[in-house]
Amino acid sequence: EQARAQAGVQGNQAGYAKLLADAAGVITAVEAEPGAVVGAGTPIVRLAHDGPRDVVFSVPEDRMSALRALRGKGGALQVRLWGDAGGSSGSATPLAATVREVASAADPTTRTYLVKADLGRADARLGQTATVVVPGSAREGVVKLPLAALFEQGGRSSVWTYDTQTSTVHSRAVQVTGAD
């Protein structure tokens, strides 16, 4: 009886040496080096299940209320996948996405909040870059510029504009509504 019990234990131990996935998917990370001795239950690989895709992105604190209001509303976001026929600016046809999860706490390093939106069965590769358009994120008549493009002249914020017809530049006063 004791020999049978020990044989059963050894059979179980041998079974722990096999790596079996619980579902079809793609290996996204290898956590152990070849030849490493690891204990039973130690994660060896990370598996991303094949199936519906999420787009994951971070947003600043001032956009949180808008994104929480969109949670669960089908197709509330527009997503353009990079690397498709549209080139680096995104795919020609935007995909509809539904906000599935909004983080309750900010990332301590970036001070942004993680958002996950469901793309359904869209043909997106794991790790593919995307542009996410949030409704109401752009204001009419507002252009975002790098801070270095602005300068102070006569007590007013200004930018340089280029006139293509005369090939000249001119100073133009602008109203700054905020800094991101």
Image (cartoon, rainbow, N blue to C red):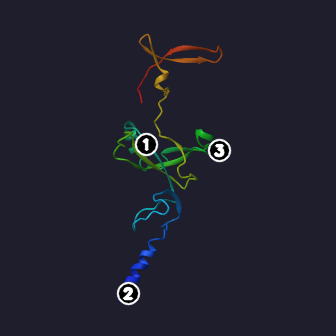
Residue nearest the viewer, comparing 61 with 14: 14
Q: Amino acid at mark 1?
A: Ser
Query: Which element type, helix, strand or loop, lies under badge 1?
Result: strand
Three-letter amino acid code of the residue under disc 2: Ala
x and y percentages locating residue 40 in the rendered image: 40, 68
- The three-letter code of the residue at mark 3 reads Ala
Q: Is residue 117 above or below residue 159?
A: below
Crowd rating for badge 1 (residues with CA inside 10 Å; few <14, some 14–19, many 20+): some
Please name whichever residue, 141 or 129, is drawn nearer the observer in this view of the structure: 129
Question: Disc 2 marks which residue?
Answer: 3
Residue 85: % across, % down:
65, 44
N-term-proximal mark, 2 vs 1: 2
Q: Is the C terminus in the top left, top right, bottom left or bottom right quadrant?
A: top left
Please name the residue that numbered disc 1 is placed on: 58
Q: Residue at x 48, y 33 (%)?
A: 138
As drawn, 1 above or below 87: below
Q: Tell me which label, 2 or 3, sits earlier in the chain.
A: 2
Q: Residue furthest top?
A: 154
| Mark 2 neighbour class, 10 Å CA radius: few under 14, some 14 to 19, many 20 or more | few
Label 3 crowding class (10 Å Cα cut-off): few <14, some 14-19, many 20+? Answer: few
Give the percent coordinates (x, y) of residue 98: 47, 49
Element type at mark 2 = helix
